[in-house]
Image (spheres, helix red, strand yellow):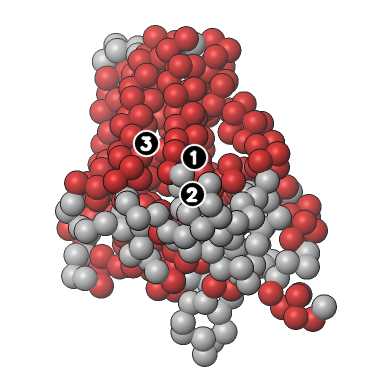
Amino acid sequence: MSEESPEAWSWHLLGLISPILVITGNILGGAYTMMGVIFIWGVGPLLDVLMGESKVIRPPRDSGRPFIALLWAHGILHFIMMGTFIWFASNEGVTTWLVAAALSTGLVAAASAIVTAHELGHQRHGSPGWRLARALLFSINYPHFTIEHNHNHHRNVATDADPASARKEEGIWSFWIRTIPGQFMSSVRIHNEKGRTGFSNPSWRGFALQLISFGVLGGMHFAGFNWALPIIVGWFILSVIAILTLEYVNYIRHWGLRRESNERKFLAGHAWNTEARWSRWSLIELTRHSDHHIRASVPFWKLRVYPDAPTLPSGYYACWWPCLVPPIWRRMMNGRFPEDSVSN
């Protein structure tokens, strides 16, 4: 292959391995329910390191058809995965393997559901892709994400007005505590400013629908349907781990990078990037984050590389474990800030 030719789209099919593993684990049950946990938390970081980074900058792809099909494949596999999880939970009961299946399903949902919804959420309001994004987000109890991401995060990223932009002094644990309610209330405020207040506010309605869903399942449990309780427990656990994983990604993408008070325009230096192959291919170019903010309407297969943008020490998977220990994370990121390279 010529160095000037676009990269093969088929590399992104690797991202379908994770949901297929979890679907298989949910069907087989027992220790097989750990396959998603092992693959995301164990194998994923190793693949980030062993596969290394893309060194050759390829031109954008000409056709988006295979990538659009890929997004729908992720979405469809996610709902199959959720279906197998509900089937497993209803037959398993509240056991250790239920927790394992919920963790596996939630970890993979962070990619197949949320990353897919993140991409589709930038499509035209009311389009089939946009509606799929809404369904994906509701399945993990985070339906307000699209409005907050599109109308606040993209406008105020790398400033204190954006709850999804982590400050340099923040560790991941305090960031989680601040950003999750902060983003929800930000979405409420956005709708209020559009005149959709009270229960006409979609964020409050979405939250109410979540509570009603859990309430109906709880009522069925007390009515004698014993399979409802493990579904409640499992759905809660998988939603929590999916949301925490999403917000971990938000954390590392903008951690410590701030715009000056007089700097209105987003620049490539306001987001962390990585060309780690495994993260790139399995997370549909989520790692080329600077260009996503500079050209939000551009689909993921056309995102460009900014060689001078700040770079993470590795891919998203390999950064997970160091990030959970803030002193280790800060030491690993030492010297990578744009101002550090200037001072050196």
Residue where numbered disc 3 is placed: 74
Observer-nearest of 205 and 130:
130
Within-10-Å neighbours for mark 3: few <14, some 14–19, many 20+: many
Q: Secondary structure at mark 2?
A: loop
Q: CA distance from mark 1 to mark 2?
A: 8 Å
Q: Measured along the vertical axis of the image, is residue 236 above or below residue 306? A: above
Q: Please report contact status of discs 3 and 1: CB closer than 8 Å, yes or no.
A: no
Q: Residue at x 72, y 78 (%)?
A: 339
Horizontal side of 332 relative to 219 (left or right) equals right
Residue where numbered disc 1 is placed: 11
Q: Earlier in the sequence, mark 3 or mark 2?
A: 2
Q: Earlier in the sequence, mark 3 or mark 1?
A: 1
Residue where numbered disc 2 is placed: 7
Observer-nearest of 243 and 2:
2
Within-10-Å neighbours for mark 1: few <14, some 14–19, many 20+: some
Q: CA distance from mark 3 to mark 1?
A: 14 Å
